[in-house]
Image: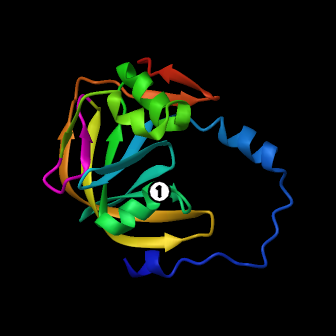
Amino acid sequence: MSLLQNLTLDPSFESGVEMQDFRDAMASLAATACLVTAGEGDTRRGRTVTAAMSLTATPPAILVSIDAKSELAALIRKSGGFSFAMLAEGQRAVADAFAGKTAPEFRFAQGAWDAWPSGHPRLENAVAAMDCAVIAEIDLGTHILFAGGLSGIVLDRAARPLVWHDRRYNAVQPL
């Protein structure tokens, strides 16, 4: 955890790369469409993300990148954790809703939901759903990296992931 907490950005770095070129290049990076959600009491927030990765196997932990100005980031900080779900092929409507195509108050109307013991929302029928406690965070200006230590996991080994590539959803086809 100490390496993660010591990460800083060089404030003197100037890229020289055009933002649209960067976005076009990153659109070529195929990734599973995922949800990050948090909840406390009657308040729930969530967002579709592809900026996520495994962090450590021992202890099991993941890393997610969340917009620093979002209500989701504030709720993750307040509640001390978040839920993470890797979406399955049949969950495109859920992905769209949490990507901003549905007003925030109606997002949780998509998909089947229950809750983890922590109180965070748990999406049913996902490829994998994880309950995470924040074990570290790094403020990187526009985004915060939250490291989540897993306190629960549910797997659907038969489900196939919903993949985001080239600004559209794709299915994984076996070779």
Q: Quadrant of the N terminus?
A: bottom left
Residue shown at the point (60%, 38%) measured from the top left = 29
Dot 1 amino acid type: Glu
Give x and y (percent) for residue 10: 70, 78
Q: Position of residue 92 (x, y in %)?
A: 44, 23
Number of marks in picture: 1
Instruction: Tell me which corner region of the image, top left, top right, bottom left or bottom right, holds residue 80.
Output: bottom left
Q: Is residue 65 magenta?
A: no
- Is disc 1 placed on a helix, strand or loop? helix
Q: Is residue 7 above or below residue 87?
A: below
Mark 1 lies on residue: 71
Q: Quadrant of residue 17?
A: bottom right
Q: Position of residue 132 (x, y in %)?
A: 27, 58
Against 8, residue 120 (above or below) is above
Report the span colored magenta. Answer: 116-125
Q: Position of residue 168 (x, y in %)?
A: 59, 24
Q: Nearer the viewer, residue 23 or 39?
A: 39
Quarter where residue 150 is shown: bottom left
Q: Residue at x 21, y 30 (%)?
A: 156
Magenta stretch encompasses residue 123? yes
Viewer-side residue, 146 vs 46: 46
